[in-house]
Amino acid sequence: LITALSAELPDTKVITIAQVVETQVAVNSLMSRLSWVFFSILLLVGGASIASVMYANVAERRREIGTLMALGATPSYVMRMILGKATILGVCGGIAGFMVGTILAEILGPQLLGVSVQPMPMLLGIGLATACVVAITASYLPARRASRLDPCLCFSEA
């Protein structure tokens, strides 16, 4: 049929629906892979900034951590304290990210793409879990460093 149509209409390009669908599937696949690349980059940047903030926090709080350890706090307690703070940051970041993302999608979806967007509460759990895992993972090394501080050295610094 395609060859007959091409012969009948020599100046036109005949494309079947199957070719259009195949092209659309390839574009969707490419966009999906690209989205995963962007998602990975965002996770790495977010994790690096959380780790940086936690390292700075440990450095600023050396004396307080040293005081806690001099009063009998165990290294595991110090580690749990810092990872607990990271968990709280992860929960707050996950909730804020879900809310901001949902509001932006509801506002910009119809304006930019002409698509109505409905909130997806099930994504809140995924967002919370991801934010907490990233925050705890990024805070593990600063927490370990804080738990290994020597109380005597913390007080000798000016």
Image (cartoon, helix red, strand yellow):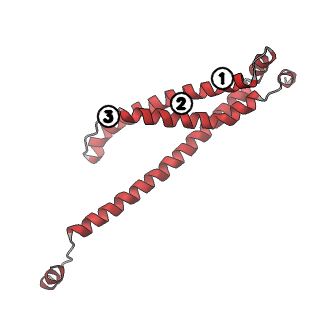
Could you classify mark 1 by the number of other residues whose Cα lies within 10 Å: few (under 14), some (14-19), or many (20 or more)?
Answer: some
Answer with left or right where residue 89 lies relative to residue 145. left
Residue furthest left as drawn: 8
Per the image, the residue denoted by label 1 is 81
Residue under the point 18% across and 83% down: 3
Near mark 3 (Cα within 10 A), the count class, few <14, some 14-19 or many ≥20, is some
Residue appearing at x 30%, y 42% in the figure: 109
Mark positioned earlier in the residue sequence (2 or 3) = 2
The front one of 141 and 56 is: 141
Of callouts 1 and 2, the N-terminal one: 1
Q: Secondary structure at mark 1?
A: helix
Residue at mark 2: 90
Query: Could you say where residue 74 lies in the image, as x and y percent from the top left?
Result: 75, 21
| Identity, as a three-letter code, of the amino acid under mark 1 | Met
Residues at badges 2 and 3 in contact (C-beta under 8 Å)?
no
Residue where numbered disc 3 is placed? 119
Distance from Cα at disc 1 to Cα at disc 2: 14 Å
* Mark-to-mark CA distance, 2 and 3: 21 Å
- Secondary element under disc 2, as helix, strand or loop, is helix
The quadrant the N terminus occupies is bottom left
Q: Amino acid at mark 2?
A: Gly
Q: Residue furthest top?
A: 71
